Amino acid sequence: MPDVKKVLVRVRVNGEAREAEVEPRTLLVEFLREHLNLTGTHVGCDTSYCGACTVILNGRTVKSCTLFAPMADGGEITTVEGLSKDGKLHPIQEAFAECHGLQCGYCTPGLLLSTLQLLKKYSRPTDGQIRKGIAGNTCRCTGYQNIFKSIRMAAAEMEKR
Amino acid sequence: MYAAPFSYHRAASLQEAVKLLQELGEDARLIAGGQSLIPLMKMRMARPTALIDINFVSELGDIRTPKGELHIGALVRHADLEHSAAGATIPLLHDCAAGIADVQVRNQGTIGGSLAEADPSGDWGTALLALDTSVICFGPGGQRTVPLEDFIKDAYTTVLAHDEIVTALHVKLPLKGSGGAHLAFKRCAPVYPTASASVQVTIEDGSMCKDARIILGCVGLTAIRAKEAEAALRGKTLEEKNIRTAADAARAAADPQSDMRGSADYKRILVGALVKRAIGIAARRARGESVEAGHEYAGR
């Protein structure tokens, strides 16, 4: 048995400094859910395929099921809990609700964050750019049509503000 | 899923990483992006007892162009290359970088890790072989430079010693009149390609092929250099008939295995079609045309 001494992981999550001592094999998604009690980030396939666990780490989306928590030490993380401000939904969340961009909602936290990164890159993405931007997020309910609608609506709304 | 327990060590420098590899022994492994290693560890197909994290080594993440050469640090993420000026200068690099897996994996996975992993389905081992690429390695004896064709020995096997680290890749900038393309066919975004082809051609007088490099991916235990396909183009005009001969030779050079991505016969046909298309795109780019290309998905 190797020496599995716990490691202190310090991060900023949604603007707040958080830390916990964890076993090195703790995945970032487990760190967020089980150690920081931020259960908005979902574990979907747990094999780096579906993207339900997507969070933003240092300005880039990553699959938090495919990162050991100590690798994110010192990082700045945005989870789905960080999207709404003062009890008001983020325009991307509003658009997904408005356009029925979700049914069961399991994939939604990841899709919202992938959309946020996509719209930072392209304020008015083409369908091709949307397709490529959310290629790492699987939804088994919607058939994606309403997700595309939601992203287009969010883009238009965010441009106005 | 939980990986088997391991101890975690963070290296602050290359020297420290090498020292840790020596101290911790054969069951220790380096971790960079982790996009191959972590899934393997979660499935318990890899059980290192110690991980040495090199993500915090600062000197490994840059892309620069010292004279005539492109320097790509081992920790450069696929997404860094996708959005780099180097990707714009050498379109083949952009084709490859922009199509690996999906956004999230490209944001995290590294080019050095991909080569050191030497997965037969990996993209970089195929793409970079179409260019003149050297792998810079650092170990207890200092630095050595290994041509990429000598670096990957077999599936998942490189010439790296246990206490050696890939620090960078050096790619010779293609000459004027040279163009390339990396095409890969995937069933969906997050998976490895079913087959891929990387082609770099140098053209004289509009359509005379002065030189050609044709590499096949995912159809053998390592990337395959299709030398007979190259010979079918060298010194000839890039017309339909010669391109077809080259594609046939590429098909013959492929050594695919049947698996869940397709039968061996299917992959052989596919890789020939990719070669044919890649030669066409490479030739247009060699003439200065701007052409979009890269990974293609089934059903699109």
Image: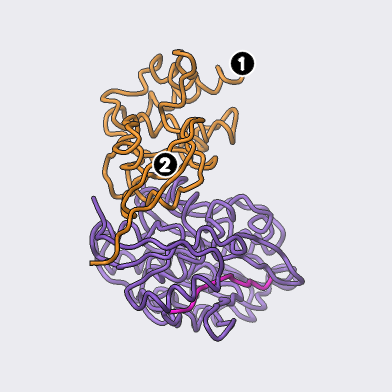
For the residues labelled 2 and 1, the Cα–Cα distance comes to 27 Å
Side (left or right) of B83 relative to A51: right
Q: Is residue B206 above or below residue A24?
A: below
- Identify the image quadrant of the C terminus of chain B: top left
Residue visible at 52% across and 35% down in the picture: A117
Q: Is residue B162 magenta?
A: no
> What residue does disc 1 label?
A161
> Could you tell me which chain the residue with mark 1 belongs to?
A
Question: How crowded is the residue under tag 1: few (<14 C-alpha within 10 Å), some, or many (20+)?
Answer: few
In which quadrant of the rendered view does residue A121 lie?
top right
Residue visible at 23% across and 62% down in the picture: B44
In which quadrant of the rendered view does residue B62 lie?
bottom right
Secondary structure mainly formed by the magenta segment: strand
> Could you tell me which chain the residue with mark 2 belongs to?
A
Q: Amino acid at mark 1?
A: Arg
Q: Position of residue A33 (x, y in %)?
A: 31, 36
In which quadrant of the rendered view does residue B48 lie?
bottom left
> What residue does disc 2 label?
A135
Q: Is residue B242 visible?
A: no
Residue visible at 28% across and 23% down in the picture: A103
Tint applied to chain B in the drawing: purple
- The span picked out in magenta is B163-173
Q: Position of residue A81 (x, y in %)?
A: 41, 26
Q: Which chain is orange?
A: A
